[in-house]
Amino acid sequence: MPGYSTCEHVVCLGGHDYRIRALSDRQQFADPHRLAERVGISSSLWSLFGQLWPAGRVLAEAMCTHEIAGKRILELGCGLALSSLVLQRRHADITASDHHPLAEAFLQHNAARNRLPVIVYRDLRWEIADTTLGRFDLIIGSDILYESGHATQLAALVLRHALPDTEVLISDPGRGHSAALTRALAAQGYAVSERRCRFDALDTAPFRGRLLGYRRGARQ
């Protein structure tokens, strides 16, 4: 037994049903070899990667129709990686990344469950430069501005891994840290656009959540 319980959700995206193994609730925790503890993931945060979050669905819905031809794409903090699954079905050049010790196992299980090929995965710590990862045309993430320091770390990561005309797309539920990211990316030459989105059935306009797009270069 793995020490935690799971459930399966069916999520319809772009006309396809995706069967997604997730943790059964936010109370799950199992770190017998202290792998999560060693990388700074506390028991209170351990289960967050394994939940289906509204921001993840908003980003995945955007990826159903987003222009991907010829682009190398990186998903940051992928968690259950709905967007990467959608992009893999669309035959995109997608690399999923996270730093939770179980993220890759859940990703590949869900890819296989949906009859998709294995998805390229990288264990990526934002604060440590990865000289082997390379650069990308499109960098995406959902609800990854979770704490105040994440905007600075994310901007530094974009600087390391963005091509001159890279696009960055973030679904943000409105935790209050997006303005810091916008300022940091503006210093790198990015212009921002935003679309307010319904993240929950109970949301009412004007919505707090938004889809943030940052672009620079020839495609801006």
Image (cartoon, rainbow, N blue to C red):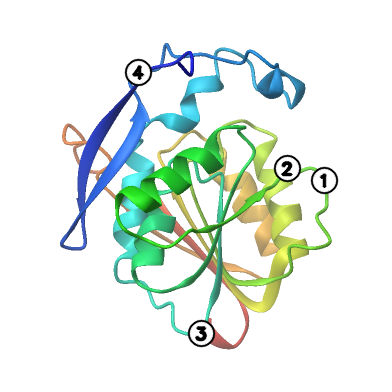
Nearest to the observer: residue 71 or residue 112: 112
Q: Residue at x 82, y 45 (%)?
A: 128
Residue 20 to residue 217: above or below: above
Instruction: Specify the label residue 209 is tagged with.
Output: none
Residue 165 to residue 174: above or below: below
Q: Residue at x 34, y 55 (%)?
A: 60
Q: Are marks 2 and 1 in contact (CB under 8 Å)?
A: yes
According to the picture, the residue beneath numbered tag 4 turns out to be 25
Q: Are marks 2 and 3 in contact (CB under 8 Å)?
A: no
Give the amino acid type for the residue marked by disc 3 in the picture.
Gly
Give neighbour class at mark 1: few <14, some 14-19, many 20+ (Cα, 10 Å).
few
Can residue 100 be seen from the camera position used here? Answer: yes
Residue 46 to residue 115: above or below: above
* Residue 109: image location, x then y, percent: 41, 44
* Residue 162: image location, x then y, percent: 69, 69
Give the amino acid type for the residue marked by disc 1 in the picture.
Ile
According to the picture, the residue beneath numbered tag 2 turns out to be 125
Q: Element under label 4?
A: loop
Q: Element under label 2?
A: loop
Labels 3 and 1: the sequence-earlier one: 3
According to the picture, the residue beneath numbered tag 3 turns out to be 70
Cα–Cα gap, marks 2 and 1: 6 Å
Q: Residue at x 31, y 58 (%)?
A: 115
Nearest to the observer: residue 6 or residue 66: 6
